[in-house]
Amino acid sequence: MINKTAMISIVGRANVGKSTLTNKLTGDKVAIVSPKPQTTRNRIYGVFTHGCTQMILLDTPGFHKAKTRLGDYMVRIVKESIADVDAVALIVEPYDKIGTQEVYLIGQIKKNNMPSILIINKIDTVKPDDILPIIKRYSEYYEFDAIIPVSSKKGDGLPDLLAQFDKYAKPGPQLFPDGKTTDQPEKQIIAEIIREKLLVCLDKEVPHGTAVEITKFSERGDEENIIIDVDATIYCEKPSHKGMIIGKKGEMLKKIGQFAREDIERFMGAKVFLQTWVKVKENWRENQTMMKNFGYNK
């Protein structure tokens, strides 16, 4: 029986593994993942149960120097997430150096007087002896409640991390129903899956200027043979980018759609008929109204 909750913000620079950790702990794909920076644009709640505690992780965008209004929004989300939670988990990579982003985030943790954990991720990429100098450097810089080396990808160190999370749990009612692993509606998750495939399949700046809108989401068939119809519009900022997304004879768009459909079917547990279109909306990342239309308005 759930009788405690713990709400923990996961923060860090881009590509340190925040979303990978959230997905690993929830046991579900609640946040998209790619090697490119700024993959996560919104604050995403990942929910799972550990013992008698409902854990709520706030997966946040990678902290970075903003260059667009969308970037400003993402940075604001990170700052707002380092407050009014039970604890903050700062994730870093196994480098013996404290970068400017980490310095700033630690400053925000200190400013808000938040309980905090340092998570050294990707320990599977270095030798065990390389971890000790990193622990020493961070422990001398700031007094975290705990410093825990993990591999989000392989699961190493996660039992120790969960034991630390448990220390922040407070008595209280269950906030999300059983089986719920995220606060995102299905349409939003589907849009994010499509955007993930854009990030994976396309190069350079093109995928960073894309947004996805689900314009149709309906079911047909009987209970044993459900088919979900999804229409998705992919927006990009330049006509040349539209050509790259569609590709020669439509091959790139077909590839993106196929990869996305496979993931959507796994997520929905049903057959999916996906249709995609591409439209140009120049400089939408600087347009407040369009950003809100795409869901960047928390």
Image (cartoon, helix red, strand yellow):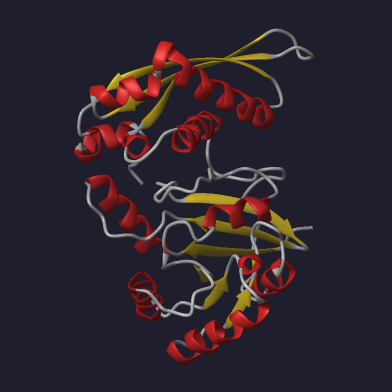
Relative to 240, does residue 116 appear above or below in the rendering?
A: below
Q: Is residue 272 left or right of residue 11?
A: right
- The single residue placed furthest to the top in the displayed view is 221
- Taking the spot 44% from the left edge, 64% from the top edge, the residue there is 12
The picture places residue 115, in percent across and down from the top left corner, at: 51, 78
Residue 66 quadrant: bottom left
Residue 276 quadrant: top left
Q: Is residue 72 left or right of residue 99?
A: left
The picture places residue 2, in percent across and down from the top left corner, at: 74, 58
Count numbered badges in the picture: 0
- Taking the spot 45% from the left edge, 51% from the top edge, the residue there is 43
- Taking the spot 39% from the left edge, 37% from the top edge, the residue there is 203
- Taking the spot 65% from the left edge, 64% from the top edge, the residue there is 151
The picture places residue 247, in percent across and down from the top left corner, at: 40, 19
Q: Is residue 40 left or right of residue 147?
A: left
Relative to 174, does residue 136 appear above or below in the rendering?
A: below
Choose between 180 and 237: the one closer to the eye.
Answer: 237
- The single residue placed furthest to the bottom in the displayed view is 140
The picture places residue 37, in percent across and down from the top left corner, at: 41, 51
Whether residue 84 is visible to the viewer of this picture, yes or no, is yes
Whether residue 216 is visible to the viewer of this picture, yes or no, is no
The quadrant in which the N terminus is found is: bottom right
